Image (cartoon, rainbow, N blue to C red):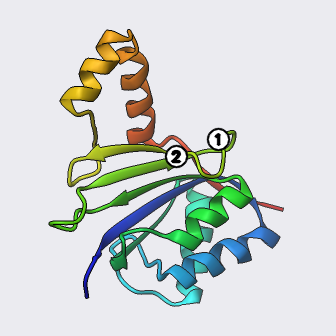
Amino acid sequence: MSDRAYASIKIGGKISRSDLKALLDAAENDGAGGPDYESVDREALEEIAEETSAAKLPLYFGAAEMRGAMFDELEEECCNLGLTYLRHSEAYPGSWDDTLEFWEPGMAKDEVIEYACSSDGEPMLSLSQLEDATAHSTLMTRLAEMRRIATFPFVFEIVG
């Protein structure tokens, strides 16, 4: 299988029970699995969502052997439902490096914040990005953004 790697996604925000079906449909269609990257059925996806909401944590799905290491349908559904997400795509040697992609309500659907990251998902700046941020006096802003993304303080909550 070419161009396939591990991927994980954290999701935060409020979602109605009626919209939860669309979110889980997208997760299932993309092959999202449990937090240990194991394959799970629809019932397990629902259980993960319910337990996460009750625990007041971000919803977390992982998957091995994801084409492009992305959750295309799930990410689009997060945007449609106004849910914040952070995807970590693990490296595929010769094609791409580890990356983080972040989206939250208020951003255009096609606008994301992307960072290179370590294998454990810590965002990183390249030397040229660091020099640019220093030259434009935006380094502290970039570091605050990176900290916010890395800590992902967004709770997943099922309402109604």
Q: Is residue 147 above or below residue 97?
A: above
Q: CA distance from mark 2 to mark 1?
A: 7 Å
153 left or right of 36 in image = right
Whether residue 84 sits left or right of residue 143 in the image: it is: right
As rendered, which of 131 and 33 lies closer to the eye?
A: 131
Q: Position of residue 40 (x, y in %)?
A: 46, 87
Q: Amino acid at mark 2?
A: Val
Looking at the image, which residue sits at the far left? 93
Q: Which residue is mark 1?
A: 107
Q: Position of residue 133 (x, y in %)?
A: 34, 18
Q: Earlier in the sequence, mark 2 or mark 1?
A: 1
Residue 158 appears in view: no
Residue shown at 23% from the left, 65% from the top: 95
Relative height, residue 72 to residue 81 (above, below)? below
Q: Position of residue 117 (x, y in %)?
A: 26, 46
Examine the image and state in which quarter residue 138 appears: top left
Q: Is residue 56 above or below residue 9?
A: above
Residue at image x 22%, y 34%?
Answer: 126
Left-right relation of 133 to 101 = left
The image quadrant where one finds the N terminus is bottom left
Residue at 15 percent across and 66 percent down: it is: 93
Mark linked to residue 44: none
| Horizontal and vertical percent position of residue 104 | 61, 45
Query: Which residue type does callout 1 highlight?
Result: Met
Q: Residue at x 64, y 60 (%)?
A: 78
Residue under pointer 2: 112
- Quarter of the picture containing the C terminus is bottom right
Could you tell me which secondary element the residue under label 1 belongs to?
loop
Q: Bin the neighbour count of mark 1 within 10 Å (Cα to Cα): few under 14, some 14-19, many 20 and up.
A: few
Query: Quick check: 38 left or right of 9?
Result: left
Other residues around mark 2 within 10 Å, as few (<14) / some (14–19) / many (≥20): some
